[in-house]
Image (spheres, rainbow, N blue to C red):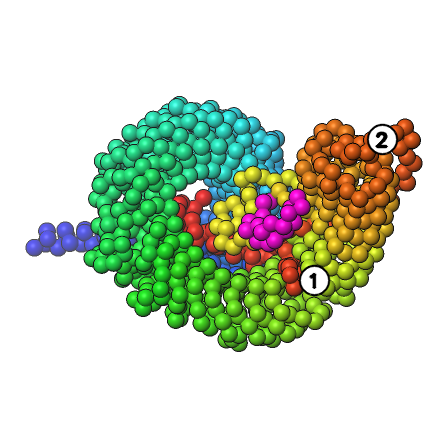
Amino acid sequence: MRCFLKLFQLLYLLLFLLNFQSSLSSRSSPIRQLCSFEEASALIQFKSSFPINCNWGPACGKYYPKTNSWKEGSDCCSWDGVTCDNIKGQVIGLDLSCNCLYGSFPSNSSLFHLPHLQKLNLAFNYFNFSKMSTNFGRFTSLLHLNLSYSLTGQVPSQVSHLSKLVSLDLSRNYLQTLDKHTFEGLVENLTEVRQLFLDGINMSSINPNVLMNLSSSLRTLSLNDCDLQGKFPENIFRLSQLNDLGLSWNYFSGRIPSSIINLRQLEFLDISNNQLEGSIPDAFPNLISLDLSSNLLNGTLPSWLYTVCTLKHIYLNDNKLSGDIKEFQCKSLEEISLGNNKLKVPIPSSISHLVNLTLVDLSNLIGVVEVDMFSKLQNLQHLDLSYNSLSLSSNGGSANYTMPNLQSLELSFCNVNEFPQFLRGSERLEYLDLSNNRIHGKIPEWMWDVGKDSLWNLNLSHNSLTDCEQIPWKEIVYLDLSSNFIRGDLLIPPSTTMVFLISNNSLSGEIPSLLCHATNLEYLDLSHNNLSGILPQCLGNLTQVLFVLNLQMNNFHGLIPPVFTKECPLNYLNLNGNQLEGPLPQAIINDTFPQWLESLTQLRVLVLHSNQLHGSIHGPWSSHSFSKIQIFDLSNNHFTGPLPVKYIQNFKVMINLTVDEREMSYMGTGGRAASDFYNYSTRIAIKGQEIELEKIFFRLTSIDLSSNEFQGEIPKVIGELNSLKELNLSHNNLRGCIPTSMGNLTALESLDLSSNKLVGKIPTQLSSLGSLEVLNLSQNQLVGPIPEGKQFNTFGNDSYASNLGLCGFPLSKRCDDTEASVFHEKEDSESGFEWKVALMGYGSGLVFGISAAYIMFTLGKPRWLVRMVEEACYKLKRYLKGRRNL
């Protein structure tokens, strides 16, 4: 018993000693330190520099203003977005991405008083186009830096001093450039970098072969849309650890080198939207996503494409691939896009067994496509079979299946004559395009429940619909019912609608005042209907956001209501072909000429022809007036006075028009990565012929001042417009000589100076105009010999009619010695004015006239429009292409 008691005492003593030692140890261990006063103050000062505004800046998936939780006097290590070292309390991480920060970013920001930062993320904020400060190079401890979608300007060379960086993201910053010297510094110093994102930065001065010198530890390289050019950089394949490679939207040409197979670790490859040729090289054994779309690739689909079971995403659309589509051996595929090639049907039966498919694009195949084969794909979200000869169940009749998860469906140009029955039950549908088919009658009632709470884009244009009783879709943003046979009163879109197109129908009655409740409308086209009555005053409710208003070819009458203000972002106003009367509202036209249009610095197209405008045109108030104008038409009015020479001097684009062939082919609202959801059209005189242009070629430059009462001489400065293609000054009261400087108009294709009072000789310099196809100098008082050579040898008598003093070919009157003698020409006058004809351009505007023509008013590209396009592109990529965010 005594022995047991001693043993118990011994154990008790041992436990006491262990507990005492533990207590001492806990007292001696350091307590987590609070952040320093200096760093907390720097963060508070940084917060106070930027108000929170989530209405501006780039589109972010989810905004969260973390700085709202920052309270002075509290421990900054507990603030949202702030990470501290647990031992020293130093701020080592700051994540303020999508924080709605708004305002200019000063070069001496208090942010640079955080010297211990290892992670910094300021992505997706609006810093008012502030340049990237050189002080970012002071963060020598940085491991991760993300400044995407935030700053602008030249990437400072000091960034290359951040030698510890593991990841660097400077992508998608507005007008940011990276020069050769700075990039070489990055290549030399960032030896530990594993992820490098430089998307959207102008790197045109950099030789792509330098890429081979990047860190051998690089796992992700994203250089999409960087203006890189030349042959595809084969040396890049020496970066054997690459897992993700993005080189899309550049100018690479040539073939894809077969040595790309050396990238054995490659899982994601995107070299879409280049100019690559040849066939697709052999196997990528570990590839998960392949995007070679929008190139010039040819040949057949490679055999490995059907057998690599890691593949989930295949994008080969918009190439020149041909042949058959074979059977897929693996069921891992989730997205497959092979549309717009020269591939043949039948579609392999294995497609119907790829149960994981969420996106299918098999548009524009050769042969008949059976839609029923997709009936088993219950996970399918996006289906594009447009531009095919389609076979539906009983031609759309009694389909015994549905697609409950379908979010987007494109069946345009498919010869469909009914609404597809498999849409029944597609409650999640967001995007539907059934345009350019043979669907007739009225929209069936069961369609009212298809995407009732989710549909945001509906295109039923160019069909034979006759009735549409209502618009039940609550979230509709884009609605196109144009070019049908819809009768009755004008339909009223929901308040969410931004684009409402219902032109070329048989609508009648007046514009109801309820339309004015759709205050989000930016594009409204009611043209080519039988609408009547007066234009309602409440249209003024729309002018804060209205971008396009097209009411041409209806039966509206009365005065134009004075509802448009100079602050209105209107780019296109077309009231042609109605019975409107009276003067233009003072807010639109001041006095006789709309001189306030000078403030529209992005204006490319101005058309005011065939109205009753009059008076003289005075000089510009600004040296930037009409600097981007490409098409200017004031024809068939009553303008008087001289041609204002100062305006002509401002036509900078006409002096040197440069067009990126890949950016845009036609004038309109589309562009790179954006859908052409609205095309501008007009009737215009080209080469002496009135032509209806449904689309306006972006290279078109035209000035038409014909059929007015302009006086004075043709200014010699007109000869500086080297990119001008069409010039019409006919049917005016112009006097004096034809300026010799017009021989410099090397791009000119049509010149009409007829029916004026021009005198003197035809300048011999005009004979050098090698592009001139149409010439009309008739009905003037010209004398002397007609120039010979080049295009002048192709013109007939009509080009010179009623100029009794002219002689030489092609006229029958020969020139004698007296007539061939030198004729003293007057010095070219420096007065003058040029204008241009046509239609809207990229980021530009248009002004169309009343009566028999168009009036288009254009404001500069406002940020709300930029945001709309960015968000539309984001949705289209997400819902239609399903691609990874770059």
The residue wearing badge 1 is 611
Please give the name of the residue rendered at 46% of the width and 48% of the height, measured from the top-left corner. Answer: 85
Up the image or down, 443 lies above or below 143; here it is: below
Q: Which residue is nearer to you in this view: 185 or 784?
A: 784
Separation (CA) of disc 1 from disc 2: 44 Å
The residue wearing badge 2 is 815
Please give the name of the residue rendered at 39% of the width and 71% of the height, measured from the top-left corner. Answer: 469
Disc sitting over residue 450 in the figure: none
The amino acid sitting under disc 1 is: Asn
The amino acid sitting under disc 2 is: Cys
Is residue 774 visible in the rendered image? The answer is yes
Please give the name of the residue rendered at 49% of the width and 54% of the height, measured from the top-left corner. Answer: 677
Is 755 placed left or right of 435 in the picture?
right
| Magenta range | 681-698
Q: Is 128 included in the stretch rendered in magenta? A: no
Q: Is 686 included in the stretch rendered in magenta? A: yes
